[in-house]
Structure formats: structure tokens, C-alpha cells
Amino acid sequence: MNQDLIEKVLTCPRLPSLPAIALEVIELCRRDDVAIKHIAATISNDPALSSKILRTVNSSFYGLSKPISTISQALVILGLNSVRTLALGFTLVGNFKNTGGEQFDPNVVWRRSLYSAVGTRCIAKEVGMAGHEEAFLAGLLQDLGVLAMIQTIGPDYVQLLCEMGDDHRELWRAEGKRFDVNHAQIGEALALRWKLPPILSTPICHHEQPGNAPADLRDIVRAVHLGALAADVYLGGESQEALNKFLSTGKRWFDIGIEPGRDLLKTIGGGTRELAKLFDIPTEKANNVNEILADANDLLLDLSLQTAQNATALEAENRHLQRKITRDPLTGIGNRGHFNTCLRRFFDHAQKQSSPVSLVLIDADKFKPLNDTHGHLAGDRALVTLARLLRDHSPENAAVCRYGGEEFGILLPGAARSDAARIAEHIRRQIEGTDIAIDDTQTLRITASLGVATYDGVRFFRRPEQLIKAADQAVYAAKDAGRNCVRIFAPRAKAPDPAEAPAPV
């Protein structure tokens, strides 16, 4: 960064300084203990400024139901931020109005800045952002560095402005290449010299690169950038392209739909024309946005389709991520986390509705010898086949999950003990009778031990963890009975805990 040039700008005698009244307003607004009447008195010391502020707050731009006759009233009804914004805006525009001299018309910059300012304020209000009055001033001042560089660098910079035309993004890049400093950096230096608050200086600094803004101010910087895109629709040569960029960026950053975006552009145009009279900035050279929107039907249709496609792609990506989070990567059925979630949900529902829920735990028999003899690849194929059998032979409303290792769980909402026992026995037979291909030439068969536990909606189990413990005990009973069988946990009527219940049968 060219610090020498920045210092040259800051100390340039030809560059208008911030008026004393503006400096005093900034200082007063920074203090917590200052009275409104003190601020009102300070602004009222400049009759011309007071008159402009009152004309503005009574205009259709603010839409007040009753006219305001004093600055004190304006402060009370509109708030400190609104009046401060207008006071600084009018003094800065007034002081920098003739910055270009004969070589450049500063209205070119101010026209774009005013569209940007109104656009930023409308966007901030549309998305419910706090500080939309500061947003207006940040939008108005974003290109202050351009005026400063015109005044201090002179013809060389004006030539660059003419070369770049309406493309401020390219202007920002070209400034950095030619002068090793850009108008955003110059504008920030001026804002800091004037002790403007971060909510104003940060958008000035980062309006061309919103992604670099600090997180706490990123939304207002984005609003300023989007306000500038709205200005490009009205003032740029490629208005259709600018419209596309405004609508797509508004959707991406603030979820502003196409129709609300079109309405915003119309509101921005009307608000800018209203304020332009008060700021004495001509807008007659602006594009007709109604014609632009009328000519943009095909473009907007494409954008709608693109938005729909993006939404569909995002939904598919979310489904994919959700699947990765909840699915076992080997077998494709639910993982342990999904099992725990479903168990809590089914158990809570059963308690509230006094309805049953059953759990079947399945443990593959002698799985370690299978791995040791045939290898882990064969073991993986066995697990995949087992998971498929469980999924294919469970009811549609069941949650089939890999509980861990060679253990699986089937949650059966609404299933009574007898129903769960019947399903478990059917699955046991399917496992026993299925050939598992462990390589291209060899198959084997496995068996499993199954345990069933049921919450009947009335008694015994108070927590879902107790249901797991009971089903686990039933699995151990099946192992002790010689494997390849089903055992059912049958609690005593008054048993307070599965550990106190008799052995499964």
C-alpha cells in the first residue's frame, strides 16, 4: 500500500476538510451523556443545514404522518441516527460538491453514491438489519476516496476513471495496479481521520471485498455492496447484466426473492429521485428500471430456474450430509447415533400414548472365528448381507441400525411383545437359511442370537436405556441356550429394574 500517497491525500490543502459542525455532531453523538437539545442546538447553528434536514424528514422518503418543524422534534421522532446521518450527509456532499473542478463532474460520483445509499438503506430495512440509517450514510460515503483521488492525483486519475467507465470493481483493481492504493483505502483513511465510527469506516474500507469484512459488520458491508449493485442497474451501461447480479447476489446473501428484489429496485429508484432534489444531485441520466425489468423476463425466468436448481441441489446435498451423519458407512443402515435418536423418540411417544414399543437386538454367532478363518473382507460381506436381511424382513415403520461390531438393533414402534417375538423368529430363520458369498467361489452360512424386550406402554421400563439392558440380557440368554435362537425378556410385575427381573425365557 502506498502510504506516501495516502498521507498526501490526507494533507492535501485542496481537499475540503470536514466542516466544524459535522465534527461537532460526530463528537456529540459519540457521548452517552449528551442531551438531545444540545445536539439540536448544534445543528440549528447552521440554518441552511437545518432547513435541508427538515425538508428531508418531511418528504415522502420518510413518510411521516405529521410535519416536523424543529430539529429537536426530528431527533425525538426519527431518532439520533437518522438526524446525524442527514447532517453528515448534507455537509459532506456540500463540501465535496465541487471537488473535481473543471476536469471532472463530481455529480457522476455523487449520483452513484446516492443510489447506493438509498439502496443500502432499503436493503437493510427489507432484511431487518439494525442500523439502517448508518447503512444509508455508509452507502453515501463508500466512494469518498474517488473524489479525494480526483482532487489530489488530478488528470492521471481522471484518465483512469474514464478508461474504466461504469465498472467500479475494475476501477478498484486498476487503482491498485497503477497507484498501489485504491479508493476504498483512501476513503477509510479519511473516515479514520474524521473519527467516524466502525459502522461507517468498515463499509467504506471493504465495500469492494465484503468477504474480508469482520464478521460483526459483514451484513452492513454486504448491504452497501448490494446497494452499489442497485446503482449499477440505474447508471451502468450493461443494465441487464447488472440486474442479474443484483438479484442473484441479494438471493445468495439475504435470501431476497426475485419479486421482492424487483420491488426493491423500484423503491430505490423512487427514494433516490426524492432525495436527489434535496441533495441537489441530478438523476435525469439514470436508466429506466421499469423498461429494464420489462425487458428482463427471459433473464428473470432463467434466474428463477437457476434459483430452483440451486435449492434442489442444496436440498440434495443436505440429504447426503444427513445420510452420512445417520448411516453406517459399511452396511448403509442406521448407525449407533441414529439408533439412539430413534429409541428416544419411539420411547417418548410410547410413554405419552400408552402404546408399546419393542426392541430386537441381534448378535451374529461366532463372528470372530469367521474373521480369523476367512479374513475381514469376508466378515464385511457377512455384515452387509445380514443388514440387508434385517432391512428386507422388518416392518416398514421399523428402524434398523447397526448397534456396533456384529450387533444390530431393530426398533419396532407399536409392536407388542408377541408381535416382536414373531418378527424376531422370522428374521432368525432368514439368517440361518441364507448363503453368504465370501469370495467368487465360496459361500457360507451364519446364525444369530436374538433378544427381545418390550415396553408395553404401562409399566416397568422408565427409561429407554433400561429397554436396551433388558434386550441385551435376552441376547445373553439366547447365547447360553446354544445360540441361533430367540429369547424374550419377561419382567416381573413389580420389578423396578431389568437387573432385578428373572432371566429371559
Image: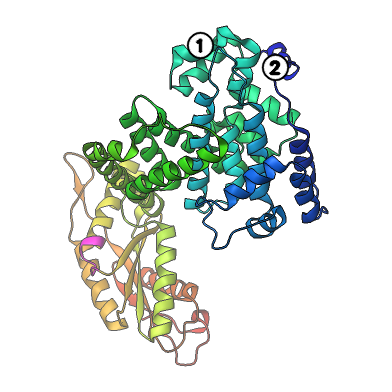
Residue 393 within the magenta-colored segment of the rendering? yes
What amino acid is at disc 2?
A: Val
How far separated are the C-alphas under marks 2 and 1?
17 Å
To which residue does mark 1 refer?
160
| Magenta-drawn segment | 391-396
**As displayed, is residue 31 above or below residue 239?**
below
Nearer to me, 438 or 293: 293
The answer to which image quadrant residue 347 occupies is bottom left
Residue 472 visible in the picture: no
Helix, strand or loop at label 1? It is helix
Could you tell which of marks 2 and 1 lies nearer the N-terminus? 2
Image x and y of residue 295, in percent: 24, 36
**As displayed, is residue 143 above or below residue 373?**
above
Residue 59 within the magenta-colored segment of the rendering? no
Q: What residue appears at the point 37 percent right and 40 percent down from the top-left corner?
A: 247
Dot 1 crowding, Cα within 10 Å, few <14, some 14–19, many 20+: some
Lateral position of residue 343 relative to residue 111, left or right: left
What amino acid is at disc 1?
A: Leu
Lateral position of residue 445 relative to residue 68, left or right: left
Dot 2 crowding, Cα within 10 Å, few <14, some 14–19, many 20+: many
To which residue does mark 2 refer?
9
Nearer to me, 37 or 267: 37
Image x and y of residue 177, in percent: 54, 10
Q: What residue appears at the point 60 percent right and 25 percent down from the top-left corner?
A: 184
